Amino acid sequence: MSATAQPQTKPENAGLAAEVRAVARAAKDAALQLSLSTAEQRTAGLKAMAAAVREDASLILAANDKDMAAAGGLTPALKDRLKLDAKRVEAMAKGIDEVAALPDPLGQVMAEWDRPNGLHIARVRVPLGVIAIIYESRPNVTADAAVLCLRSGNAAILRGGSESVNSSSTILASLKRGLKSAGLPDAAITRLPTQDRAAVGELLKLDDLIDVVIPRGGKSLIERVAAESRIPVLKHLDGNCHTYVDRAADLAMARKIVLNAKMRRTGVCGATETLLVDRRVARTHLPPILDDLAKAGCELRGDAETRALDGRVTLANDSDWDTEYLDAIIAIKLVDGVDEAIAHINRHGSHHTEAIVTGDEAAAKKFMAEVDAGIVIHNSSTQFADGGEFGMGAEIGISTGKLHARGPVGAEQLTSYKYLVQGSGQVRP
């Protein structure tokens, strides 16, 4: 949508618009202060944040209990995303520790060279500025987004879903306490002051104050942000992920990987939604894999050939190949080798995470080169699609686009760069 086509603020929203602009203005000022802060300051702030989360664990869990009590209408997968326990709170704090231990990206010299005229040119990492993160359900995103933005010197404006408002608010209060202890500006991490959906619309107009918007949630949220935003959008689309079991796959390995890729946590974006199996090994490999999935409580939907092999399989329709279930449901299709698997994935996948199980190095190399996705995996589970598992400490999301960042978006991916040119009096002839 062009800027001229953007809806104007209605008179009744004037107060809300002013409130949202004030939050963004404060974040803009804080972003400048952050860009001038030292790596040591930011590291100290992160360590203090991790300590505050641990100290406030009981408060965070009590707030989450309130959110869970009000979550009656959510699907089991969304409830799993919303739910916090002691282990998940500790994982949140551990993730902050890991981000604190990462090399500071700001000021890193990405490349430098000298010109024949004596000019020295360096390309150096700098923050993006102000990042607005709009997300649903998962309260841990509050911590992930805040700490990654701080590590990379960006100010963050957070807008979590109403279903996680108590959890997210309590986590944010803990993070702010850590931020202040390091002498960093309070507005460096902030949130919209209301759950009014109109506030998001006002936020998306502020291209003079906000540099990037990152939506993380369901397809309807992503589509709304992409349609309404005047600000560049770093999109995290749905995770319609595939695992392909090749004719050269080790059966024991394939069984272990497929079961984990689908059933470890069905509500995460890296869960496998479609299983592709080479037709040549369908009779040997597919029945035990389907048996594992069925015993774990997974609903099986397959093509006619798969259904003929196992009576528990219901017939899939065309929409199943394009569906991110986020549930204990999997679609299964037989294919004629790696070429047909690649063609199916590139047609139906969401460019998120795709995996091949095979002992054939040539097939693996072809798959990894030709599949169009942010993450492509050989002989492992798609559930490793996670910034923490990549050693990034945390992530804001998995970018499925190709501009600026792709795959897990960590601290380094939240930077841009500028060129520093050092001369000694040169003028251009």
Image (tube, grey):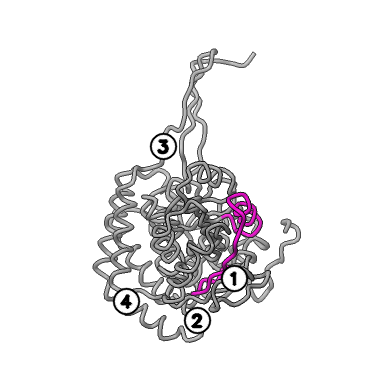
* Mark closer to the chain start, 3 or 4: 4
Q: CA distance from mark 1 to mark 3?
A: 52 Å
For disc 4, the neighbor class at 10 Å (few under 14, some 14 to 19, many from 20) is many
Q: Secondary structure at mark 2?
A: loop
Give whichever of 143, 388 is nearer the camera: 388
- Quick one: 113 or 21, which is closer to the camera? 113
**Residue occupied by mark 1:** 302
Q: Residue at x 46, y 34 (%)?
A: 124
Q: Nearer the viewer, mark 1 or mark 4?
A: 1
Query: At which x and y percent is residue 109?
Result: 43, 32
Q: Is residue 346 magenta?
A: yes
Answer with mark 1 or mark 2, whichever residue precedes in sequence.
2
Q: Amino acid at mark 2?
A: Leu
Residue 215 placed where, x, y %?
55, 62
Crowd tier of the residue under label 2, counting other residues whose Cα lies within 10 Å: few below 14, some 14–19, many 20 or above? some
Residue stretch in magenta: 324-351
Please tell me the numbered disc located at residue 74. 2
- Looking at the image, is mark 1 or mark 3 earlier in the sequence? 3
The residue under label 3 is 107
Closest to the observer, 108 or 27: 108
- Which residue is label 4 attached to? 61
Query: Closer to the N terminus: mark 4 or mark 2?
Result: 4
Mark sitting earlier along the chain (2/3): 2
